Amino acid sequence: MAYRPVMPGVFVHRRDTHYTDRLDEQYQFPKSYLSRASLFKGDWAIYYEPVKAGGRGFYAVAFVEDIVPDPTTPDHFLALIQPGSYLDFGQNVPHRIDGELVEAGLRNAQAAVRPLLPEDFVRIINLGLGENPSDLPRTDFTDGETLAEERLPFSFEHEQERERILTSRTARDANFRKAIIGAYDRRCAFTGLQFINGGGRAEVQAAHIKSVSAKGPDSVNNGLALCGTMHWMFDRGLLSLGDDLSIMVSRHVNDIGSIDRLLLPSRKAVVPDDPKMRPYPHFLEWHRNSCFKH
């Protein structure tokens, strides 16, 4: 069998793209990029949104499970993303820092699909997973999906360590929380409350809409910022959201009057102003169909 090199890469995604991207599931590209994209199969790819076009820079990472022909578009292919591997960075990484390219090995900035030197991959991941103590998960509680594991450092020096870090539930939860509370301005989507403790740490929690156990991605579009009580009720199917962001209360709630007083008077969830950061309807549909107790 012929040796096939594997290496990390970059997928460029524009907000006004005409491609059929759903970045936690697939990335579409033309045949001209096939040889480059094939290098990423079995490795990680970082998503980049051009800053000049109002984008976020390097903002997420996902594992490329396979490359297949697009059955709907001639001469196009799909990079299939491993379910549950997509991870929004806790902080976006700019193209340049102090005038120096973060992607030091860049040869063609116009290429929408390009390989990434291992040392550049390590640099971008370390910056994107940057640790902020006020954004780390609480240590005095765990939800049903958080694995009990020893706290891992979020930065690494060697390319070989990337699998350990990028698949660590502790590291992924911390960055998911950081991305969510930033997008929601530390405010509970259901109550509108914004509690900050004496140490400057937000008390709001990051809730997955489609659960981790169901291979839901660690993306802002699959998350909500919720206070502890709302998070508990949402995970247990006592609360959900309609596609119009109306808050749904299960008939199994035994004290609806008290819950009504906690919820926003409008009974509409508060979500980020940027439509690209709001919950995706297919995740909300999953929660209503698979979790919510009607």
Image (cartoon, rainbow, N blue to C red):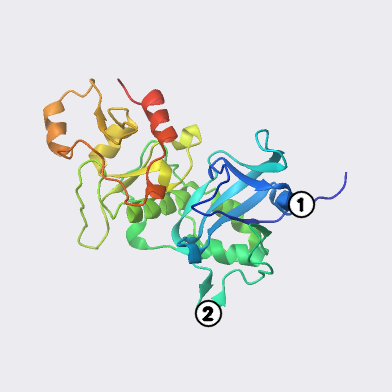
Please state, as top left, top right, bottom left or bottom right, where the N terminus lies in the image. top right
- Decide: is 8 above or below 29: below
Q: Which residue is mark 1?
A: 35
- Image quarter for residue 278? top left
Residue pictured at 53% horizontal, 69% vertical = 95
Q: Dot 2: within a 10 Å radius of its alpha carbon, few (fewer than 14), some, or many (20 or more) residues?
A: few
- Left/right placement of residue 90 relative to residue 198 reads right
The residue sitting at 58% across, 52% down in the picture is 164
Q: In the rendered structure, find residue 187 and report the number of the disc placed on it.
A: none
Decide if residue 265 is on the left or right side of residue 79: left
Q: Secondary structure at mark 1?
A: helix
Look at the picture and state if 98 lies above or below 225.
Answer: below
Q: Residue 139, image x and y in percent?
A: 34, 50
* First-in-chain label (1 vs 2): 1
Q: Which residue is mark 2?
A: 99
Could you tell me which quadrant the C terminus lies in? top left
The residue that appears at 52% across and 62% down in the rendered structure is 50
Q: CA distance from mark 1 to mark 2?
A: 31 Å
- Residue 180 lies left or right of residue 200; in this view the side is right
Q: Amino acid at mark 2?
A: Gly
Residue 82 % position (x, y): 60, 40
